[in-house]
Image: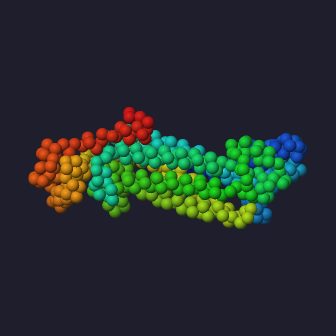
């Protein structure tokens, strides 16, 4: 996580001051529940809340931790400095450090997920707008990087919309998966704390009680969360790669917006490079590299070890901050993206009529020609288009065998571009629920 690729709303979630505030709320709510159960005096629980407006001194906590070598004890010591040692003596009653750490981590991940969901909503809106705008803007589809058959720019945006819509559903599921808390004691048995305390704290923090924990919340939940972020990152790269290819000089069907005063190269003033989408490809790699460590965190010794702890201190902020930045950047790219319809048609016509080869093939088989013979008839003419840049339709019209099977009018009828766009409305209705 570096400032260059970070936005404040997300980084604030991972600031030490935010973390300590969540720790405080967990401890204070637990004291309330303990007082309700008669385990601790009500006056002591109320004393803890006198620190609710305190800005905890991060430097002071670090100073204490330098001696204690334990972050939660350092925080509890600092809390007692605010509310009084006697008043704070029941804080953390029956709890273990992971009750605080794990519940806090999940609060942070839920808050991060909410920001990412909002990011996805903004990206979906941008993709839908561009899809509707270019619904019938014809361009050549490519497979293996080679011209295939006509499609539309709107369908390109629509498939990216559908992919990100699936990611939105995945993120909601991942958010729900990780939205649990545990206040269950040293090995999760509630031996020294009532399960009602966990229920109370979780309700106050918007979490569900973990059905069964050990000393920690099971890490398969977190593996699911980070895996979902990795899938979203891969989808970002999928879109970025398409835009990068479109912006190539010899393609130039679309491009990132190039702002006034922007420079593309220190050496070549003519350059307009796809720097934002190249950056997104790199950021996607950073997010995905957090997935395997999250999965390796699932296997812990017995009721817990701390091999997962150092990993999560890194991947929690890194993955969420980076993905938030990437989604926001991609939304801006889509909103401002330049589209060049004339270039799309020019590219498709570099090999005149060639994209209609399958339609001619099918027409020949329907006219009674065997598929093997039909393929040979079409291919011998298609290869001449590749090699000599001749017109495919004209070559077919000069091929006696093709004319004999289809007739000249039959051949001409197979070069109607509308044939390839006749079901665009159907696809749009499937994706967006509307043909508008």
198 or 286: which is nearer to us?
198
Residue 189 located left or right of residue 220 = right
435 or 369: which is nearer to us?
369
Residue at 75% across, 58% down: 215
Residue at 12% across, 49% down: 404
Residue at 47% across, 59% down: 282
Q: Quadrant of the N terminus?
A: bottom right
User: How is the protein colored in the picture?
Assistant: rainbow
Residue at 36% across, 61% down: 266
4 or 290: which is nearer to us?
290
In the rendered image, residue 84, in percent from the top left (x then y), is placed at 86, 49
In the rendered image, residue 431, in percent from the top left (x then y), is placed at 43, 41
* Up/down of 121 relative to 70, above or below: above
In the rendered image, residue 312, in percent from the top left (x then y), is placed at 64, 59
Residue 192 located left or right of residue 147 = right
Q: Quadrant of residue 97?
A: bottom right
Residue 284 located left or right of residue 399 = right
Q: Can see residue 360? A: no
Q: Quadrant of the C terminus?
A: top left
145 or 106: which is nearer to us?
145
Q: Quadrant of residue 421?
A: top left
């Amino acid at each position: 996580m570096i400032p260059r690729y970070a936005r404040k709303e997300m980084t604030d979630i991972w600031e030490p001051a935010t973390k300590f505030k969540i720790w405080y709320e967990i401890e204070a709510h637990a004291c309330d529940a303990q007082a309700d159960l008669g385990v601790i005096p009500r006056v002591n629980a109320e004393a803890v809340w006198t620190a609710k407006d305190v800005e905890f001194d991060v430097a002071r906590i670090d100073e204490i931790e330098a001696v204690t070598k334990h972050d939660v004890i350092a925080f509890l010591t600092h809390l007692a400095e605010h509310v009084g040692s006697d008043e704070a003596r029941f804080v953390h009653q029956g709890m273990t450090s992971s009750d605080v750490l794990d519940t806090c981590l999940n609060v942070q991940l839920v808050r991060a997920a909410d920001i990412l969901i909002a990011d996805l909503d903004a990206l979906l809106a941008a993709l839908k707008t561009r899809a509707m705008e270019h619904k019938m803007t014809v361009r050549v589809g490519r497979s293996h990087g080679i011209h295939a058959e006509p499609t539309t720019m709107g369908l390109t945006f629509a498939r990216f919309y559908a992919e990100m819509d699936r990611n939105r559903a995945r993120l909601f599921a991942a958010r729900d998966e990780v939205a649990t808390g545990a206040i269950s004691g040293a090995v999760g048995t509630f031996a020294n704390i009532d399960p009602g305390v966990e229920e109370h704290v979780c309700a106050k923090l918007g979490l569900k009680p973990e059905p069964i924990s050990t000393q920690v919340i099971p890490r398969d939940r977190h593996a699911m969360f980070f895996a979902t972020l990795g899938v979203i990152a891969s989808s970002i790269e999928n879109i970025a790669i398409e835009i990068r290819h479109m912006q190539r000089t010899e393609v130039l069907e679309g491009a990132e917006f190039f702002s006034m005063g922007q420079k593309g190269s220190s050496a070549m003033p003519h350059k307009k490079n796809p720097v934002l989408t190249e950056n997104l490809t790199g950021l996607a790699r950073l997010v995905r590299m957090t997935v395997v460590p999250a999965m390796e965190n699932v296997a812990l010794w017995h009721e817990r070890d701390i091999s997962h702890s150092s990993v999560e201190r890194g991947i929690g902020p890194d993955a969420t901050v980076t993905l938030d930045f990437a989604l926001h950047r991609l939304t801006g790219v889509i909103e401002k993206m330049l589209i060049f319809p004339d270039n799309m048609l020019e590219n498709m016509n570099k090999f005149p009529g060639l994209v209609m080869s399958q339609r001619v093939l099918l027409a020949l088989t329907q006219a009674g020609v065997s598929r093997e013979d039909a393929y040979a008839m079409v291919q011998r003419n298609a290869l001449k288009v590749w090699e000599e840049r001749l017109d495919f339709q004209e070559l077919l019209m000069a091929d006696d065998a093709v004319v004999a099977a289809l007739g000249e009018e039959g051949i001409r009828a197979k070069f109607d571009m509308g044939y390839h766009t006749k079901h665009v409305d159907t696809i749009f209705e499937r994706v967006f629920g509307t043909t508008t």
